[in-house]
Amino acid sequence: MTFRSRRWLLAPVVAGAVAAAGLSLANPITAADAGVAKGKARNVIFINGDGMAAAQREAARLYLAGLDGQLTMDKLPYSGQLTTSPHDPKTPITDSAAAATAWATGEKTYNGAISVDVDGNPLPVLGAQAKAAGKSTGLVTTAQVTDASPAAFFANTADRGKQDEIARQYLEVTRPDVILGGGEDWWLPAGTAGAYPDQPAEDPSEASKGTKGDLIAEAKSKGYRYVSTAAELQAAKGGKLLGLFGNEELFQQRPEGQGDVYAPPASLATMTEKALSTLSTNKKGFFLLVEEEGIDEFAHNNNGTRMLQALGELEKAVAVARNYAAGHPDTLVVVTGDHECGGLTVEDTDASDESGDGISAEDGPFAIKGSSQSFKLDWTTSGHTGADVPVTAYGPLAEQFTGKHPNTHVHEVLAQILTH
C-alpha cells in the first residue's frame, strides 16, 4: 500500500517565516521501485524526528511543499502508525529514553531508562548486535551524541542523565564507527574546555562536566579521528570518526525571540552524508541512526518557527538517505518520531477561533508554500503527549511497517537485518 492511499486525518496546521533555503523536495521514487525491494537487506538507516507526530509532519508539508506537495519522508511507499506508551508506573506518556529503548531492545521500560528493563537490568541493544554481526555502526544527531535516543542503541544505564558514562560505553563497549553531533561537555572533565569554550555568551550554563577523564583523548587513542568544525568533517577520510560540534545541543532551544537559535555548525544532512560515505565501505553492511532533536526541543518551547526550521533540516537528511537507498537497494530507510511534543494541531487563521494564551496560545500565521493561504499552529502543552506517530519506510522489509503497531515493532523489523 502506498503512502498516498493512507493520508493521516489531521486538524489544520501552522507554519512560520522559517528559512528553509536550499531544501529540495525532489524525490527519485517511481512506480517502478515503490514495491518490495528484492535481494537481501544489508543496511538500515533509521531516522528519528524527535517529538514529531502527524501534526508536525503536516505543518512541515504545508510550509515546505505546499497544499498539493509531499515531503520526501511522506513519499516513502509504505506507511503505518506506532503507539508510544512506556511501562512506567507514574505515567502513560513516554519520554525519549523509554521510546528509544523500545526501538533498540524490543522491550518497554520506564522513562529515563537507557536500554535497561523495568528492574534496571541491561538489555541487548541493536547497535552492539549489528557490530557483533560484522556491520559498521554510526549515529548522527543535532542533540548531544550521548542524549537519550542515540544512547539507547549503544549503551545501558538506569539514568539517561549519565551522559559521560554513555560516552565511555561508546568507546569501550559498543564502539560505533561514526559518532557525530553535539555534547562535547560530556567528553571532557570539569575545568577542561575543548574546541567549544566553557560559559559561552549564548548559554553561560554550558561547560565541561565529565567524570570519566578525557574521553576525546581516549577516542583518539582508540583510532578515532576527532573533528569539531564543518571543514574538518569534510576533510575527514575513512576510518573511525568522532565529531562534536557544540557544548550541548547544536542549537539554543528557547521561546521565540528569547535567544532561540538554530544554526548547527555542521548540518544534519552534511553529517548524514559523511556518515554514509564512511560506513558504506563495509561489505557486510551498516546501521546508521539519524536524529533531528530540534523538533522536540522547540516544541517544548512552543516555538513554531524554529520547529519548522528543524523539520526542514530533517527533510534534507531524509532526502540524503533516500537518495543513497535509491542506488543501494539492499538498504532499508525508516522515518518516524519517538513521541509527539506540544499537543500540536494545525488550524485555520480565522480570528474568531479561540486562541488562548500561555501554553495554549496560537502560533503564526505561517505561509503555505506556493499559495496565498496560511495556517496557524495551536499548542496545548509544553510537554509530550500520547498521540500515535506516523512511520514511513522504503526498501527491504518496508512493507512490515504498514498497519498500527507498538513502538517495539521497530525492533522486530530492524533486528531481522542487523542481527545476522
Image: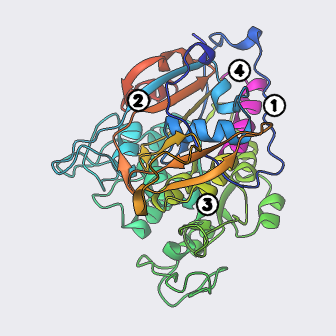
Which mark's residue is nearer the viewer, 1 or 3?
1
Q: Earlier in the sequence, mark 4 or mark 2?
A: 2
Residue 404 lies, in percent from the top left, at 40, 21
Q: Residue at x 71, y 30 (%)?
A: 67
Instruction: Return the x and y of residue 264 as percentages of the image width and height.
Output: 69, 64
Per the image, is 38 magenta?
Answer: no
**What residue is shown with label 4?**
329
Q: Which residues are magenta?
A: 314-330
Choose between 103 and 295: the one closer to the eye.
295
C-alpha separation, residue under disc 1 versus residue under disc 4: 19 Å
Q: Amino acid at mark 4?
A: Pro
- Hey, what amino acid is under mark 2? Leu
Residue 367 falls left or right of residue 179: right
Foreground pick, 179 / 13: 13
Label 2 Cα crowd, 10 Å radius (few <14 / some 14-19 / many 20+) = many
Residue 46 shows in the view: no
Between 345 and 373, the one nearer to me in the picture? 373
Gap in angstroms between the C-alphas marked 4 and 2: 25 Å
Check disc 2 and report the residue beneath it.
Answer: 82
* Residue 317 on the magenta span: yes
Residue beneath disc 3: 181
Which disc number belongs to residue 26? 1
Q: Residue flagged by tag 3: what amino acid is it?
A: Gly
